[in-house]
Image (cartoon, rainbow, N blue to C red):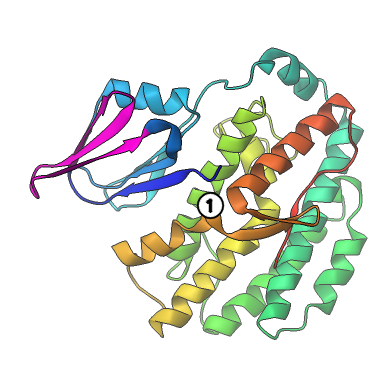
Amino acid sequence: MIKKTLFFSQPAYLHILNRQLVIEHKHQNTSYQVPVEDIGFVVLENQQITITQSVMASLIDNNACILCCDEKHMPSGLMMPLAQNNTFSEKVRYQLEASEPLKKNLWKQTVAAKIRNQAALLKSIGIDSTPMLRWASEVTSGDKENVEAKAASYYWDKYFSYIDTRCKRHRNGPPPNNLLNYGYAILRAVVARSLSASGCLLMVGIYHRNKYNAFCLADDIMEPYRPFVDKVALNIVSQCGEIPEKLTTEIKRQLLIIPTLDTIIDGQKSPLMIATQRTSASLVACYTGEARRMLYPEYC
């Protein structure tokens, strides 16, 4: 089932009544309800939103994510269930005991899938992707040659040149980096939710290791999904006719379609949020020894 994404950009009062999320906009004198079990993501952007403890508890009990934004309206925090899997402790044990060769193999698969999807995006906009495909085939165990960095340099140079030759990719860089950052935050929440539901510890990554990062595993697994966000950003720039300096409410609505984007995974068409669930399940199968291949989407 595709879960709903709720986006709150105006002051609101959120509370629970009969397992329904009640949303009251007092300044508009309006109120409506949404079944809690239908909600997958809640984005709280406005600083004047009041949310009760029962709302947070109910959302978490239904494996929903709450994404909080800072005063600049950028995602800054993520509230997640601690454990929504009935065999959580067993699966965590497999994850923690995963051998280095296994983790290196999983990272190889992840990097190769990411580069292939980046190549497919470039090809879709008429840019030569031949070097990217060659590099994808050259990724070794653990990507010890750092092919990912070589491919990223080529990819971002072509990507931003397509938009504007003056653009460069940097997290704190000028637009359209703001589009990418917002989109990646949404993607990270989607992936983190799926991993949590599969019984994984989010802070224990395959490749990413950072004592200040509680979402290392999500940052690993989201890599092959990033080109889907990159395409949405390209579409927004194309529709605007220029690089948007500010993220308007309408632009954010377009970025919030990311969980429902079409993907092809294991030969089947699936919304992105379903694909991340299949990817997460395949990761657990690799940890437990039931499988050797991770399922990642193909850019389409």
Residue 37 occupies which quadrant of the picture? top left
Binning the other alpha carbons within 10 Å of mark 1 as few (below 14), some (14 to 19) or many (20 upward) gives many
Quadrant assignment for the N terminus: top right
Q: Main secondary structure of the magenta part?
A: strand
Q: Is residue 209 left or right of residue 54?
A: right
Query: Is residue 32 within the magenta segment?
Result: yes
Q: Position of residue 190 (x, y in %)?
A: 55, 44
Q: Nearer the viewer, residue 247 or 153?
A: 247
Residue at figure coordinates x 69%, y 44% from the top left: 221
Residue 124 in view of the camera: yes
Q: Quadrant of residue 127?
A: bottom right
102 above or below 125?
above
Residue 207 placement (x, y as % from top left): 74, 40
Span of residues in magenta: 12-35
Q: Nearer the viewer, residue 206 or 296?
A: 296
Residue 211: % across, % down: 59, 30
Give the side of residue 158 with respect to residue 241, left or right: right
- Give the answer, above or below, for where 188 lies relative to 196: below
| Labels in figure, total | 1
Let me know if residue 48 appears in the view: no
The answer to if 241 sits in the magenta stretch is: no
| Side (left or right) of 298 relative to 183 | right
Q: What residue is rendered at 80% in x and 57% in y?
A: 267
Amino acid type, label 1: Pro
Residue occupying image coordinates x 66% and y 24%:
199
Q: Please, what secondary structure does the residue beneath circle 1 have? A: helix
Question: In which quadrant of the rendered view does residue 52 lie?
Answer: top left
The percent position of residue 110, horizontal first and vertical second, equals 78, 49
Q: Could you tell me which residue is drawn at 64 percent across and 71 percent down?
A: 156
Quickly name the residue at label 1: 259
Question: Relative to 19, is 297 above or below?
Answer: below
